[in-house]
Image (cartoon, grey):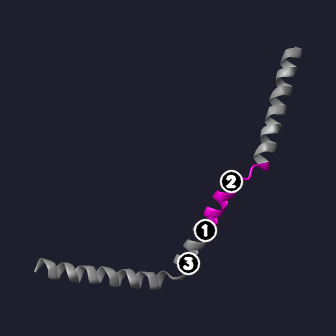
Amino acid sequence: MKNILNTTKNTGTKFMNGVKAFWQDENGMGTVEVILIIVVLIGLVIVFKKQINTIVDDIFKAIREETREITN
């Protein structure tokens, strides 16, 4: 019975040490920064959607015209 209690106590201590280490670990900060940058970029795309569509349409129009000149 003592062996089972010691095993349970050791497991609980290991778990709590793992939780403390995870809480104090700062390696995830890079991930948070990347996510924030992505959110800002998505926001910019939403705000300037019309302008971006106009630019992309103009680029594809120019590509189509130049391809027609090449094939003719």
Residue at x 28%, y 83% (from the top left corner): 61
Would you say the residues marked 2 and 3 are in contact, meaning their CB atoms lie under 8 Å apart?
Answer: no
Which amino acid type is marked by label 2?
Answer: Gly
- Mark 2 Cα-neighbour bin, 10 Å: few <14, some 14–19, many ≥20: few
Viewer-nearest of labels 1 and 3? 1
Residue at x 55%, y 81% (from the top left corner): 47
Residue 60: name its quadrant. bottom left
Residue 71: name its quadrant. bottom left
Left or right side of 71 for 23: right
| First along the sequence among labels 2 and 1 | 2
Viewer-nearest of labels 2 and 3? 2
Residue lying furthest left: 72
Please tell me whether mark 1 sits on a helix, a strand or a loop.
helix
- Inspect the magenta stretch and tell me whether residue 53 lies in it: no
**In this figure, which residue is indicated by the disc labeled 3?**
44
Residue 38: name its quadrant. bottom right
- Label number found at residue 37: 1
Would you say the residues marked 1 and 3 are in contact, meaning their CB atoms lie under 8 Å apart?
Answer: no
Please tell me whether mark 2 sits on a helix, a strand or a loop.
loop
Left or right side of 1 for 29: left
- Label number found at residue 28: 2
- Inspect the magenta stretch and tell me whether residue 27 lies in it: yes
Q: Tell me the CA gap for discs 1 and 3.
A: 11 Å
| Rendered location of residue 43, percent (x, y) | 58, 75
| First along the sequence among labels 1 and 3 | 1
- Mark 3 Cα-neighbour bin, 10 Å: few <14, some 14–19, many ≥20: few
| Rendered location of residue 29, percent (x, y) | 69, 57
- Mark 1 Cα-neighbour bin, 10 Å: few <14, some 14–19, many ≥20: few
Quadrant showing the C terminus: bottom left
Q: Which residues are magenta?
A: 24-36
Quadrant showing the N terminus: top right
